[in-house]
Amino acid sequence: MPTWEYAPAPESRDIANLKPNYRMFVDGAFVEGAGEPLKTINPATEEVLAEVSTAAPSDVDTAVKAARRAYEKVWGPMPGAERAKYIYRIARMIQERSRELSVLESLDNGKPIKESRDVDIPLAAAHFFYHAGWADKLEYAGFGPEPKPLGVAGQVIPWNFPLLMAAWKIAPALACGNTVVLKPAETTPLTALVLAEIIQQADLPPGIVNIIPGVGPVGASLVNNPDVNKVAFTGSTEVGKLIQSAIAGTGKKVTLELGGKAANVVFEDAPVDQAVEGIVNGIFFNQGHVCCAGSRLLVQESVADELLDKLRTRVSTLRIGDPLDKNTDVGAINSKEQLTKIRELVQAGEDEGASRWTSPCPVPDKGFFFAPTVFANVSQAMRIAREEIFGPVLSVLSFRTPDEAVAKANNTPYGLSAGIWTDKGSRILWMAGKLRAGVVWANTFNRFDPTAPFGGYQESGFGREGGRTGLEAYLDV
Ligand code: NAI
Ligand code: MG
């Protein structure tokens, strides 16, 4: 077998224009927050990247008030065609600064540069472009002749796709005429603050977008602020439930994008090599820190041995290490806490009797890393089959008949996404109709596009983001 050795090909970290200090963005200005400053680190090296000021409850209040003023005086009354120009300008500026944003994202999050460069940043720009197009066409979106915005949106996002999640939240809110207060995740605040710089340079009037870093309680005081009309959250099911009960009865409109434990179902007639690539992309993309990751592989028994052999061979070739190296396939785990959680669940898998295989690839000794791991002989009751691991760990189960595949795929409290691999179009349609998942991919996995609505069933949350359907979450319909 060829060894596929590569020389290091690191992207220069200077491109990130890293500053020692970052401040909150409130009412059009960068200001010091009264909260405890946080230090954001590079998870690949554990070095401190920058100190970031955070919001105290009084700052949350100030930001929401600024957003309210901007909503009433400027953004709400502005014609859609005018709003579109700003959103379009933001999209263009993200493209212009894409290299800087990619390197900064990889430094702060740990994801491989090839992913931030080819997925996160281009998609973030695409969300602004797409929604710029809607801003003057809302009356044709199917929600009545004059759909109205909701007001101030309080948005809380996670650390797995920092800039992309900010774009998913901000772009539709702005297109529909709402103003925004957004809290990035505590471990990945930097690209959202560069987005704030872009927003300032795009001359968006003050207060329309406010970005306030901070820890969980800052998010809680944002979503609970009585002057917030719409809450949008992406993160853990645990916090999603807290938010839902906290705002029950307040009349706030809410969308929750929570966890997942997606089934990736491979039938015996599937093209095996393609399926292997799809499985790898499904679970090892972004270190498995993906809510819609294909973390449960369901493979038809007749091809299970062959598929697993090929899969292990392929996974052994994945290069793990420096996120800034253009050849890196698997980067760093975002935080020590997340690494601890992955280790604990992997230990549970071993204790419960599943067969663990871990790629023999070399792993850096500094930073937070976890080698790609595949568990075979997994049964449905095991924790590794039920809980979201949110790491580069795949659980493999088998099935004999299509009905059994459906039953096993749906045997989860979640329902965000699923994959089907088969040569038969009829089977794809049959399965897609039976799977309780918001997104079903056929002979592919982890494909994202701003035109396609994304969202879950059951404990994966509710509401849709993206596409025409996604506009509904930001309109009074
Ligand atoms: P988390 O849900 O605690 O954090 C997500 C965001 O919510 C962060 O911005 C955080 O500051 C904020 N937050 C925390 N508590 C809050 C509260 N009470 N009210 C409002 N906002 C609050 O997720 P965490 O702790 O980072 O990860 C834990 C697990 O959650 C992961 O291991 C993974 O399984 C899952 N997760 C799922 C994500 C997804 O995209 N579905 C994203 C992040 C985590
Ligand atoms: Mg947390």
Image (cartoon, helix red, strand yellow):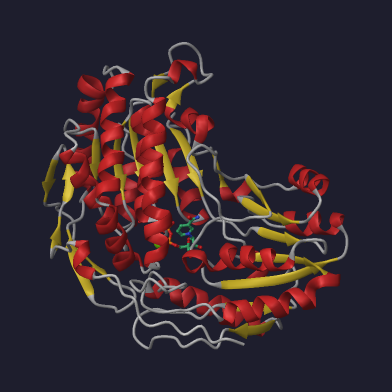
Q: Is residue 474 left or right of residue 222?
A: right
Residue at 42%, 19% in the rendered image: 137
Residue at 25%, 53% in the rendered image: 213
Q: Is residue 49 left or right of residue 398?
A: left
- Image quadrant of ligand 1 equals bottom left
- Rendering quarter of residue 271: bottom right
x%, y% of residue 386?
65, 65
Q: Residue furthest right?
A: 401
x%, y% of residue 71?
26, 25
- Asked if residue 214 shows in the view, the reply is no
Residue at 58%, 50% in the rendered image: 460
For residue 59, above or below residue 286: above
- Rendering quarter of residue 426: top right
Q: Is residue 312 left or right of residue 180?
A: right
For residue 450, above or below residue 309: above
x%, y% of residue 223?
36, 42
Of 78 and 442, nearer the camera is 442
Image quarter of the N terminus: bottom right
Of 360 and 145, nearer the camera is 360
Q: Which residue lies furthest to the front in this view?
A: 2
Q: Is residue 272 left or right of residue 131?
A: right
Q: Which residue lies furthest to the top in this view?
A: 145
Of 415 and 139, nearer the camera is 139
For residue 273, above or below residue 186: below
x%, y% of residue 148?
40, 18
